[in-house]
Amino acid sequence: MESKNITSHLFPKADVDSTVLKRIKEQYDQEGYCVVDNVYSGAELDEMETFFEDFKNHDYNAFGNAISTDEGWEENYTFNFSEIDPSKELLRAMHPHRFSQKVKKWYLHPKIGFILMNLLGCPALGAQTMYYYKPPQSVGQGMHQDNFYLLSTPATCIAAWTPIDDTDEENGCLKVVRGSQNTKILCPPREGETNAIAEMVERSEIVPIYMQRGQTLFFNGQLIHGSSPNKSLTRSRRTFIGHYVDSMTERLAKFYHPILDMDGNKVSNILIDKNGGPCQ
């Protein structure tokens, strides 16, 4: 498989060039994603890396497949960091912004909000944070669409995906089906198949996205994406991720409430989706 020679866009440190914003928007609309440089500063990335290395040493039940809400844990599938076997399941922190104001600051970063406004055409709202540790020899993630889970309506969600480590196919970089942002939500044909959606996609359409520390990938919630296992013996593929919806959102799955505006205030006018989405 040939790697995708991605085009990244420099986020200026001072005034924002309108032509850069136009190119970002054009690529996002055409391909379902865009890569932007300098969203987070080098110092912010250093702080993020240090924070999450320390985070795993605390007694947080923030790992595994459950998602916390104000009412508690939705499912009994959360563990301490040491209880997860990364060769068998994803090693990730779920909603770490609910444990730390620092994470909330990165999640609701002004540059993130500015770029999302440009891509969405209206203000963004925060729905979820995640941090993937993905150490050497750990599992990948099956092909999926984010809005299969978030159930954002009427518009889909959007992700901001920021690697702490350079990513390539050896350490399990993200892979996308370019242009699939125009695809409806696909329903896996068999229960229990974590990668069943891959059977619905031509392998020639799957493009690996190589990235460097200091870049952020923004992608549409309908975009089909996933990753292969980390085959490296020495390199991790750590990533900070925020999921967002636009301010016109009417419904969102329960797991992602409470929703925040980009100033950190709770948003109360979005209904909890109880229908289970198109695949129920």
Image (cartoon, rainbow, N blue to C red):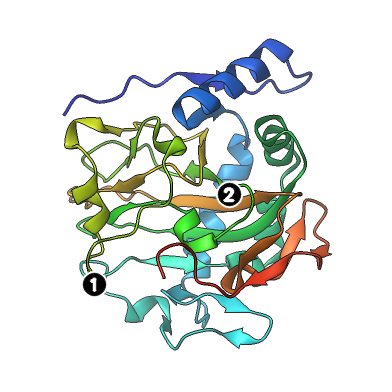
Name above or below for residue 262 compared with residue 203.
below
| Furthest-top residue in this view | 19
Q: Which residue lies at the image location 62% right of the left edge and 34% below the top edge?
A: 39
Say whether residue 244 is visible.
Answer: yes
State the quadrant of the C terminus. bottom left
Judging depth in this view, the residue of 54 and 262 nearest the camera is: 262
Q: CA distance from mark 2 to mark 1?
A: 24 Å
Q: Is residue 273 left or right of residue 200?
A: right
Judging depth in this view, the residue of 269 and 41 nearest the camera is: 269
- Could you say which disc has been placed on residue 271 in the image? none
Q: Which residue lies at the image location 77% right of the left edge and 21% below the top edge?
A: 14
State the quadrant of the N terminus. top left
Count residues near mark 2 (Cα–Cα under 10 Å), then give few for <14, some for 14-19, many for 20+: many
Q: Position of residue 153 (x, y in %)?
A: 62, 55
Name above or below for residue 109 compared with residue 55.
above
Q: In terms of secondary structure, where does tag 2 sit? A: loop
Q: Is residue 80 left or right of residue 106?
A: left
Decide which of tag 2 and tag 1 comes sooner along the chain.
2
Q: In terms of secondary structure, where does tag 1 sit? A: loop
Kind of residue indicated by mark 2? Cys
- What residue is shown with label 2? 157
Q: Position of residue 97 (x, y in %)?
A: 64, 64
- What residue is shown with label 1? 192
Q: Position of residue 64 (x, y in %)?
A: 40, 74
Total tally of numbered discs in the picture: 2
